[in-house]
Amino acid sequence: MSTKKKNRGKQPIRLCVCCKKEAPKSDMLRIVVNSEGKAEEDESIDETGKKKGRGAYICRSFKCVDKAYGDGIIGEAARDESYESITKYVLQFIAIAMKAGKLASGEFSGEESIKDGQAKLIIIAEDASDNTKEKFANKCKYYKVPYIYFSDKETLGRILGKNERSVVSVKDNEFGTKVLNIFGGNE
């Protein structure tokens, strides 16, 4: 059997330069580095994986991007581009979860999913009212449901194909865990 056929369906594994965790290449951000291990000044995040130069990988998580910036591995432009890339990545996950029927959106549905024990993660829009933020943070703490503040009401609604949404409840453990890991755990 040829090597191509034997390795079909397997994803390449890469090591994060910040947290030293191994993950599939698709879950990492590639940066082009010079001989000293620092990102090239004229280069930024390599989404295609085809830019010339030695590649280094960072987890698609805000925590690892912040550490890479703090350690001087990436510059400010690469950090900002990484934030944008991670945000798009999370929005794609939310859209996929919606299509798979693993979400409840809106305050009423979110509250019901928390009480029913179906909520694995609550996403609260950053521009939600202070009352809504406090209400859902307290409910999540009481029922021990992880929560994050992410995006804005308009973007969350648009990605779900609905009007503005202040609260989105992820009802699938895998989707919830994946998104929570991107944010570095619970608040």
Image: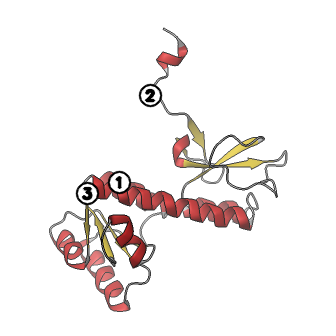
150 to the left or right of 66: left
Front residue of 63/26: it is 26
Label at residue 9? 2
Amino acid carrying label 1: it is Ile
SS for dot 1: helix
Of marks 2 and 1, which one's residue comes earlier in the chain?
2
Q: Position of residue 103 (x, y in %)?
A: 26, 62
Label at residue 102? 3
Instruction: Tell me the quarter of the picture where residue 156 sits.
Output: bottom left
Quarter of the image where the C terminus is located = bottom left
> How much space separates mark 3 and mark 1, taking CA atoms?
9 Å
- Residue that extends furthest to the left in the rendered view of this protein: 116
> How much space separates mark 3 and mark 2, taking CA atoms?
25 Å
Q: Is residue 164 above or below residue 17?
A: below
Give the residue at x 33% y 51%.
Answer: 174
Label at residue 96? 1
Give the residue at x 21% y 76%.
Answer: 111
Of marks 3 and 2, which one's residue comes earlier in the chain?
2
Crowdedness near tag 2: few (<14), some (14–19) or many (≥20) residues, C-alpha within 10 Å: few
Amino acid carrying label 2: it is Gly
Give the residue at x 25% y 79%.
Answer: 107
Give the residue at x 34% y 79%.
Answer: 166
Of marks 3 and 1, which one's residue comes earlier in the chain?
1
Instruction: Tell me the quarter of the picture where residue 114 sits.
Output: bottom left
Label at residue 70? none
> How much space separates mark 2 and mark 1, taking CA atoms?
21 Å
SS for dot 3: loop
